[in-house]
Amino acid sequence: MYDIYDIFVGLLAVIGTQKLFVWYKRYQKSVEREVFKLVSEIINVVEQHHQNAGLSPSGSTQDIFLAINHVRDNLILPKDRKRMAGLWEKAVRFLDENESRIRREVQQVAGEEFHVWRWLPNNTLNKSNAQSPSLNKKSKVWQGQAFETMEGSVNSLTCSPTPCLKIRHMFDPDAENDDNWEIKIQDAILEKCGEGVKILHIRVDRGSREGCVYMKCISQEDAGKAYRALHGWWFDGHLVTVKYLRLERYYERFPDAVHCTTPLKPSNNKRLSMQAHYWQSPLESN
């Protein structure tokens, strides 16, 4: 009698633990999505404020930056601020560690010191790079995942329709001033996908305002692996998105891809784009 009771209790404990684990993972992903939504909204607000300040007749330095608390109060309703305090801190920390276009400073506003954000336009970054040659050689790195893309998730197709992909937001055409920046982009894709994905052709669209890269894999299965490895990841401060392209459309645009049969490899074995510490989850980063 006691043996059956113990087995029953044990089974309930196992089932309860599994359900708790599933709930916790879903909760983690939910928190992750909220944090990255905040990050995107903050970036949009600070960039838009910088653009508006540039058009302002006053042109004062005070117009160029925004108090961090002021941004928070504009994005989060008063009734939600206490509940979202932890999410806000994680978003701020992510920007400090991973977003090169926004700089945190301390400025005096109306006689009080405030932590503020200042948007660094491309020309500012380029001037800084010109003054410091070592910055020109800075590697572009993968910075973490915005949302889940593994098989079975809502962001991944059950099967890959074609072996060809279009990858958006891999670069900013106005900010690329290295002689070998295209090679760095190609290396980053190959390094992120890894040796388990056979990629036959990559073309960086230099004129793309969306920072597009086109890629053909050896098979639809490999394209699916590449999709899951790239879609929804942050790279060099940009959120990368991926979509599939029809094979015939790909060949129309890149006829030379028809003759590519040897899998590509990175230009070196240093895996430079993988050097950043991945900020995997807002909860795991504590």
Image (spheres, grey):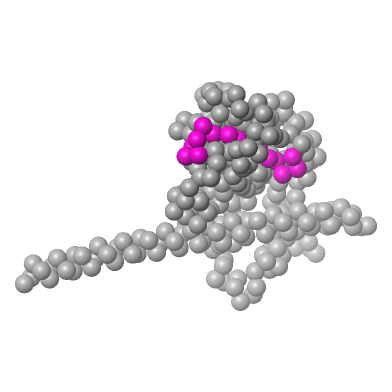
The outermost residue toward the bottom is: 79
Residue 241: horizontal and vertical position, in percent?
A: 61, 47
Q: Is residue 236 left or right of residue 161?
A: right
Q: Is residue 144 visible?
A: no
Q: Is residue 147 visible?
A: yes
Residue occupying the point 47% across, 39% down: 221
Residue occupying the point 68% across, 40% down: 212
Closest to the observer, 208 or 76: 208
Asked if residue 218 is among those painted magenta in the image, a careful observer would answer yes
Residue 267: horizontal and vertical position, in percent?
A: 58, 23
Asked if residue 20 is among those painted magenta in the image, a careful observer would answer no
Residue 76: horizontal and vertical position, in percent?
A: 65, 69
Closest to the observer, 230 or 86: 230
The outermost residue toward the front is: 248
Residue occupying the point 78% across, 61% down: 109
Image label count: 0
Closest to the observer, 253 or 231: 253
Closest to the observer, 127 or 238: 238
Q: Is residue 117 left or right of residue 266?
A: right
Residue occupying the point 79% across, 57% down: 49
Q: Magenta region: which residues?
A: 208-222
Quadrant for the N terminus in the image: bottom left
